[in-house]
Image (spheres, rainbow, N blue to C red):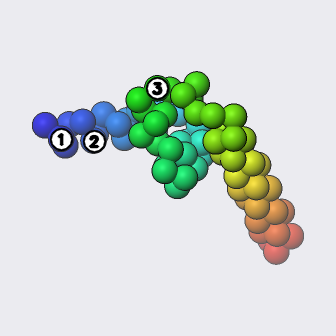
C-alpha cells in the first residue's frame, strides 16, 4: 500500500510547476513540509513563508548565473 501512495505523490510532484517543486523542496529542507501537508501553505508563519521565498530567490539567481556562465563557454 505504501508503494502506491509513494507513486501517487511522485505523480503529483511531477505535475507541479518548477517553482512549486522548488518551494516544496525548500520547505522540506527547512523541516516545514509536514506542517504544509497538514494545514496548507496558510499554516506557515510570515517568517517561515519569507524564509522560503528568500531561499527561492537565492536559488533562482544561482541557476540564472550558472546558465549565463554555460552560455558564455559555448
Can you identify the residue that label 1 sits on? 2
Q: Which mark is residue 40?
A: none
Q: Is residue 65 visible?
A: yes
Q: Earlier in the sequence, mark 3 or mark 1?
A: 1
Which residue is found at the position 42% from the left and 32% from the top? 37
Q: Which mark is residue 39?
A: 3
Front residue of 11/27: it is: 27
Q: How many marks?
A: 3
Q: Is residue 61 above or below residue 69?
A: above
Toward which corner of the image does residue 20 lie, by quadrant? top right
Q: Tell me, yes or no, whether the two marked residues, 1 and 2, touch with CB atoms within 8 Å.
A: yes
**Image location (x, y in percent) of residue 11:** 37, 35
Q: Secondary structure at mark 1?
A: helix
Q: Is residue 67 visible?
A: no
Quadrant showing the N terminus: top left
Mark nearest the camera among 3 and 1 is: 3
Toward which corner of the image does residue 46 lie, by quadrant? top right
Horizontal arrangement in the rendering, residue 16 relative to residue 34 (left or right) = right
Which residue is found at the position 37% from the left and 40% from the top? 10
Can you identify the residue that label 2 sits on? 6
Horizontal arrangement in the rendering, residue 13 relative to residue 53 (left or right) = left
Quadrant showing the C terminus: bottom right
Q: Is residue 62 above or below residue 41?
A: below
**Image location (x, y in percent) of residue 29:** 52, 55
Q: Secondary structure at mark 3?
A: helix
Q: Earlier in the sequence, mark 2 or mark 3?
A: 2
Q: Is residue 20 above or below residue 55?
A: above
Mark nearest the camera among 2 and 3 is: 3
Front residue of 26/74: it is: 26
**Image location (x, y in percent) of residue 72:** 86, 70
Separation of marks 1 and 2 at Cα, in angstroms: 6 Å
Amino acid at each position: 500500500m505504501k508503494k502506491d501512495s509513494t507513486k501517487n505523490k511522485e505523480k503529483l510532484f511531477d505535475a507541479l510547476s518548477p517553482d512549486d517543486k522548488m518551494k516544496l523542496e525548500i520547505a522540506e529542507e527547512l523541516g516545514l513540509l509536514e506542517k504544509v501537508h497538514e494545514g496548507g501553505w496558510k499554516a506557515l508563519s510570515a517568517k517561515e513563508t519569507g524564509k522560503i521565498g528568500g531561499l527561492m530567490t537565492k536559488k533562482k539567481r544561482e541557476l540564472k548565473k550558472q546558465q549565463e556562465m554555460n552560455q558564455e563557454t559555448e
